[in-house]
Amino acid sequence: MSSIAEKLQRKSPRAATTKQVRLKLVYVDFWSAVKLSFLIGVTLGIILIVVSVLIWIVLDGTGIFGSLDSLFQSILGQPEFSVTAVFSLGQVALFALVIAILNTVVGTALGAVTAMLYNFSVRVTGGLLVGFTNN
């Protein structure tokens, strides 16, 4: 008597059928594009702020600012010059925050403009043909 595994092994394997679906992207929702571009802008802004603060902390911790102070003091001849007084952590973080806000606003506007331009261009081109397969 044979086992179930042997019976299954003797059967010829069927070729797996793959389904293909071809769809046309003929409309991009304006508000969805605006929301997505806003979220991407906020995410990149947070990354910019964190990276700026971390770079400042690393440069301060490794003594790069002290080396720059001594270099600028010897070049300029001013003994009271300090790089950390000009570029403090608060100033760097505030500058990064302002740039992050500007990038978020500009990125959101660009996402909105891109969605509108795509929706207008679909009338001429007919849309983007996208193919999907089921493996």
Image: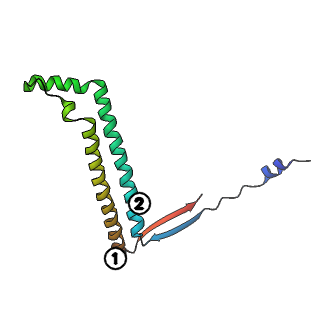
> Looking at the picture, how far across and down is residue 64, in whole percent?
25, 26
Q: Residue at x 15, y 24 (%)?
A: 71
Tell me residue 1's x, y (percent).
92, 47
- At x 33% / y 43%, what residue is drawn? 49
Q: Quadrant of residue 83?
A: top left
Identify the residue shown where x is 22% and y is 35%: 87
Residue at the extreme right = 1
Name the quarter where the C terminus is drawn. bottom right
Q: Secondary structure at mark 1?
A: helix
- Could you classify mark 2 by the number of other residues whose Cα lies within 10 Å: few (under 14), some (14-19), or many (20 or more)? some
Of 112 and 58, the residue lying toward us: 58
Q: CA distance from mark 2 to mark 1?
A: 25 Å
Helix, strand or loop at disc 2? helix
Q: Which mark is residue 53?
A: none
**Is residue 97 or residue 37 the one in the foreground?**
97
Given the image, on which type of amino acid does mark 2 rest?
A: Leu
The residue that appears at 65% across and 59% down in the rendered structure is 16
Horizontal side, residue 87 vs residue 12: left or right: left
Residue 70: image location, x then y, percent: 16, 22
Task: Tally the marks.
Answer: 2
Give the label, 2 or 1, closer to the camera: 2
Which mark is on residue 36?
2
Q: Which residue is mark 1?
A: 124
Q: Amino acid at mark 1?
A: Val
